[in-house]
Image (tube, rainbow, N blue to C red):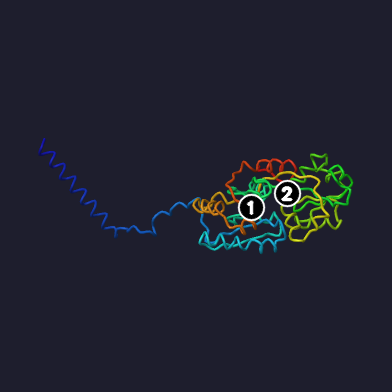
């Protein structure tokens, strides 16, 4: 039995040697290199070479772009990478740019964030602590001329009204909410208003009320007070007849932005201590924020026809 086992093993070894030699005779052995390795699975995150920052034009686009140049330089210094600012001609343009993956960071209002969220994946990361309220909220206000005889929302029946941009939170959504609560029918052009128009921006609305183009309008309180402070609007001729708190503007990033870059952006904002930059940003300081803070804007935006919900 021992001899038989040795013979079987010898035959087996010989067969393996012959098989190996035969395979070698078919051609040179293929070498493994980086060129013929399977492609690595693409990461679900991305890191841009230039940070593209979008800003909603809550004042005229040209003024907004010039106004935020100090922030552009600040971000470049802190990130060590190029930063490019983008301001669309209207609020929807910034939403479209984010949906088209042309932005890496965007300054939205609560409504524009909610609108963008129905079309793409993004996350709010920080918002400002407002100097007036000491919280993350600020005021949407409905204003009228002091000599108009319009003192309450009820007094607007049969009058004319200006919203800002249709996608403005404090210039469109919250004035709608206040009017609807007072009995105006948004499905019937806010009857019994005689006319409702869109001015395009807070500064334009303030001027429209001031010069008598409309009887009242919805604006962001902070912007109105800045216009008054800068001498662009005569504050003595305007009054607030209704106001409501609004959750602060969220800075948002795409959900697939590099986590380390997102973390760095949060750190940069919450540690801003330059008084001039904070004043530019209308902030006492910045804090982290999440999507829960904007549920009211989302729900009311859908209810009042300003947001098309996800299918």
Residue 67's place in the image compared with 8, above or below, is below
Which quarter of the rendering shows the C terminus? top right
Q: Residue at x 72, y 51 (%)?
A: 168
Q: Say which quarter of the image contains residue 56.
A: bottom right
- For label 1, count other residues whose C-alpha is less than 10 Å away and answer few (under 14), some (14-19) or many (20+): many
Is there CB contact under 8 Å for labels 1 and 2?
A: no
Q: Residue at x 57, y 61 (%)?
A: 74
Percent x, y of residue 228: 76, 57
Q: Nearer the viewer, residue 130 or 40?
A: 130
Q: Say which quarter of the image contains residue 155.
A: top right
Q: Residue at x 26, y 58 (%)?
A: 25
Drawn side of residue 145 relative to residue 294, left or right: right
- Foreground mark, 1 or 2? 1
Outermost residue, top side: 1
Residue on which disc 2 sits: 170
Residue 261's place in the image compared with 246, above or below, is below
Residue on which disc 1 sits: 283
Percent x, y of residue 271: 54, 53
Residue 22 visible in the snapshot: yes
């Amino acid at each position: 039995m021992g001899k038989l086992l040795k013979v079987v093993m010898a035959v087996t070894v010989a067969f393996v040697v012959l098989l190996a030699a035969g395979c070698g005779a078919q051609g040179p052995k293929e070498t493994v290199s980086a060129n013929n390795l399977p492609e690595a699975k693409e990461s679900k995150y991305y890191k841009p070479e230039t940070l593209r920052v979008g800003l909603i034009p809550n004042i005229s686009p040209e003024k907004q772009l010039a106004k935020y140049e100090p922030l552009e330089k600040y971000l470049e210094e802190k990130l060590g990478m190029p930063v490019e600012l983008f301001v669309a001609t209207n609020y929807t343009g910034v939403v479209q740019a984010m949906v088209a993956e042309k932005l890496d960071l965007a300054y939205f209002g609560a409504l524009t964030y909610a609108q963008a969220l129905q079309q793409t994946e993004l996350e709010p990361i920080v918002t400002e602590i407002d100097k007036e309220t000491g919280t993350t909220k600020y005021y949407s206000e409905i204003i009228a001329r002091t000599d108009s005889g319009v003192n309450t929302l009820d007094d607007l029946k049969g009058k004319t009204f200006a919203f800002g941009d249709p996608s403005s939170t404090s210039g469109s959504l919250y004035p709608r909410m206040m009017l609807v609560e007072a009995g105006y029918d948004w499905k019937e052009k806010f009857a019994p208003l005689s006319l409702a128009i869109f001015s395009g921006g807070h500064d334009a609305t303030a001027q429209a009320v001031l010069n008598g183009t409309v009887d009242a309008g919805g604006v962001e309180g902070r912007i109105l007070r800045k216009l008054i402070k800068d001498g662009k609007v005569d504050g003595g001729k305007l009054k607030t007849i209704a106001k409501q708190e609004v959750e602060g503007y969220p800075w948002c990033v795409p959900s697939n932005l590099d986590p380390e870059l997102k973390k760095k952006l949060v750190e940069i904002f919450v540690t801003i201590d330059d008084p001039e930059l904070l004043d530019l940003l209308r902030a006492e300081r910045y804090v982290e924020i999440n999507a829960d803070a904007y549920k009211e804007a989302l729900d009311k935006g859908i209810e009042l026809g300003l947001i098309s919900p996800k299918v």
